[in-house]
Image (cartoon, coloured by chain):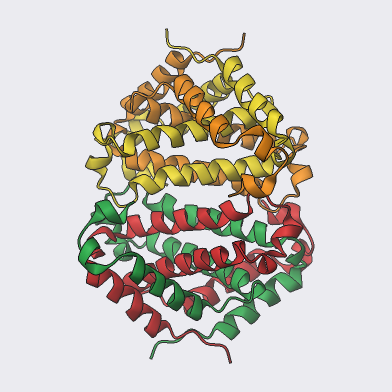
Chain colours: A red, B green, C orange, D yellow
Amino acid sequence: MKIINFEKLEEAVFKFSGDRDWDQFHSIKNLAMALSVESSELVEIFQWMKEEDSNKITSDETKFPKVKDEIADIFIYLIRLSSKLNINLEEAVMEKMKKNIEKYPVDQFKGSSRKYNE
Amino acid sequence: MKIINFEKLEEAVFKFSGDRDWDQFHSIKNLAMALSVESSELVEIFQWMKEEDSNKITSDETKFPKVKDEIADIFIYLIRLSSKLNINLEEAVMEKMKKNIEKYPVDQFKGSSRKYNE
Amino acid sequence: MKIINFEKLEEAVFKFSGDRDWDQFHSIKNLAMALSVESSELVEIFQWMKEEDSNKITSDETKFPKVKDEIADIFIYLIRLSSKLNINLEEAVMEKMKKNIEKYPVDQFKGSSRKYNE
Amino acid sequence: MKIINFEKLEEAVFKFSGDRDWDQFHSIKNLAMALSVESSELVEIFQWMKEEDSNKITSDETKFPKVKDEIADIFIYLIRLSSKLNINLEEAVMEKMKKNIEKYPVDQFKGSSRKYNE
């Protein structure tokens, strides 16, 4: 079974900011901004790429390590946020998936990007 | 020990898109965009808020559930991306933290937002 | 000659916020966030669309008015920012284009997305 | 009267991409992404800054030129998009402002960030 040791990650990221006295900058508002900035850095890698080329990114030796780093950065801010807000990520996803299943009934949305988009 | 059952989440999110035939829309490029859109929806909640008020968001009965949902949405796209790219999120974070520790030596960056920002 | 009457737009957007006492929320930091949120709302319209379909958006009677509104919202925040910062948009673009021309010499970058991206 | 010579800017930005054969990358979808990436680069400058410090950015000799460049980049993509989509920016803003005035009646929204935010 694949699991994520959340506690280990949480400790690592909070030790890092604690050691540097950076918690003072980490209001929820600022962390949300930082997360969105990191996610744009991920987008930037793909912005001029064809979709089919983006799907082959794992074999790009220059860009794939950068993708990995950006994904790590996004997860780091997500860990900070969920930890500060006492949000259990596993539960939050399961609850949201339940809402999504109700919001998008299979028979109405199967294969449809149009409705998906609205 | 707090852990995330990644496998359970992965199965849930891929069953959801599989059932709806939505995998066709989920190129890496599009997923990166979707993740950044969700992270902006999180930012939107805080955009006119004072930092100190953002830190009290858990007691806002209207907005906190929305924050939770947006954080879940971000994690859902992160699960999709890391799964498709075969990125182990736990390892990726630990490796990135190692780089960050080297990049920002405590003695030079302690308490400094100026350097942090550059 | 196509011109934009900047002064008219500036007056309209500042009268709007002045009448509502909303200038108190419009720090440069918040305006930058709001601009990025609006630009993500524009992205959202296209996130699952094929590139070629995005190029035909003007004939989509439902989505094109939304595109127009989002572009207007982005420009509104750009007007607020440049006005508060005393930045002359025309001059700023001409200066930036000069830098771009030097940074990307035609003979090295012609037709190249790879280099463009780096 | 402050005006923007839109035609001059339009010619400059399209000559730039034409000379480099970059129009092939500039689908509406990609341009929207690029605009959102640039706007996040603007946000990044302010992400750890206090709001009051962001309001003094014009006197920061290192950061203000960067702010100017990012604002120019955002406007450049806005020019590309509005030109390709045949959107008259001045008209689009005036129409959107009319909608905003109706959506947020002064007597209900004066001074209110709460409602503003919803």
User: Can you say which quadrant of the picture contains the N terminus of chain A?
Assistant: bottom right
Q: Position of residue A42 (x, y in %)?
A: 55, 58
The structure residue drawn at horizontal position 35% and vertical position 65%, both measured from the top left corner, is B103
Q: Position of residue A118 (x, y in %)?
A: 66, 51
The structure residue drawn at horizontal position 46% and vertical position 55%, both measured from the top left corner, is A36
Q: Nearer the viewer, residue C85 or C39?
A: C85
Q: Residue furthest front?
A: C107
Q: Is residue A85 visible?
A: no
Where on the picture, by quarter, is residue B66? bottom left
* Left or right position of C84 against A92: left
Q: How many marks?
A: 0
Q: Nearer the viewer, residue C60 or B89?
A: B89
* Left or right position of C106 against C90: right
* Left or right position of C99 against D32: left
Q: Position of residue D115 (x, y in %)?
A: 37, 43
Rendered position, B80 above or below A3: above
Q: Is residue A5 visible?
A: yes
Q: Nearer the viewer, residue D58 or A3?
A: D58
Where on the picture, by quarter, is residue B62? bottom left
The structure residue drawn at horizontal position 58% and vertical position 43%, both measured from the top left corner, is D34
Q: Position of residue C10 (x, y in %)?
A: 41, 20
The structure residue drawn at horizontal position 45% and vertical position 45%, both measured from the top left corner, is D41
Rendered position, D68 above or below B28: above
